[in-house]
Amino acid sequence: MNTVGIVSNIMGQTVALDWHNDTVDELLAKFSSVNSSVERTGGFTSIERNTLFQVVARNNSLFIDMVGKLGIKDRSDTAWNLSQYEGLHEGMRKEFELDERFRVS
């Protein structure tokens, strides 16, 4: 049962990262648009300023969700309390590249 818990936790995290990645791509597109406009004009319109604040706020919310709610940087309780499961936990994290995918999100 402990193995199932670790596997399901990692699978849940990888699915959540995929879902969040789509949102990150949308935020990057908005930021790129605002950035191009500022580069051309040298300033923000009020709409661009509001968009930039919304992008930053949404980015912060995503980060809080991934770290706080998903525990993307945490070791599982099972791996923490039962050392024989640590290898499984770390192996799956590496297999699904959770740290790398989180870093580039």
Image (cartoon, helix red, strand yellow):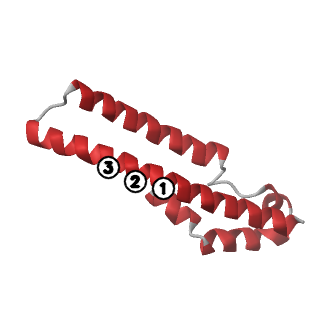
Q: Would you say 41 lies left or right of 92 here?
A: left
- What is the spatial separation of the Cα atoms under label 2 and label 3, in whole angstroms? 6 Å
In terms of secondary structure, where does tag 1 sit?
helix
Q: Quadrant of the N terminus?
A: bottom right
Q: Nearer the viewer, residue 87 or 11?
A: 11
Q: Is residue 59 above or below residue 84?
A: above
Residue 17, given in percent of the width and then of the height, sits at 56, 57
- What is the spatial separation of the Cα atoms under label 1 and label 2, in whole angstroms? 6 Å
In terms of secondary structure, where does tag 2 sit?
helix
Residue wearing tag 3: 29
Which amino acid is tagged 2? Answer: Asp
Query: Tags 1 and 2 in contact by the CB under 8 Å rule?
Result: yes
Q: Is residue 29 above or below residue 56?
A: below
Residue 59, given in percent of the width and then of the height, sits at 45, 42
Query: Tags 2 and 3 in contact by the CB under 8 Å rule?
Result: yes
- What is the spatial separation of the Cα atoms under label 3 and label 1, in whole angstroms? 12 Å
Question: Badge 3: few (under 14), some or many (20 or more) residues near its Cα, within 10 Å?
Answer: few
> Going 64% across and 58% down the picture, which residue do you hit?
13
In terms of secondary structure, where does tag 3 sit?
helix
Residue wearing tag 2: 25
Residue farthest toward the top in the current orientation of the protein: 46
> Going 68% across and 69% down the picture, which residue do you hit?
90
Q: Is residue 83 visible?
A: no
Residue farthest toward the right in the current orientation of the protein: 1
Q: Would you say 53 lies left or right of 35 here?
A: right
Snapshot quadrant of residue 55 = top left
Residue 86, given in percent of the width and then of the height, sits at 77, 68
Q: Would you say 44 lies left or right of 51 here?
A: left
Q: Is residue 43 above or below residue 25?
A: above
Snapshot quadrant of residue 65 = top right
Residue wearing tag 1: 21
Which amino acid is tagged 1? Answer: Asn
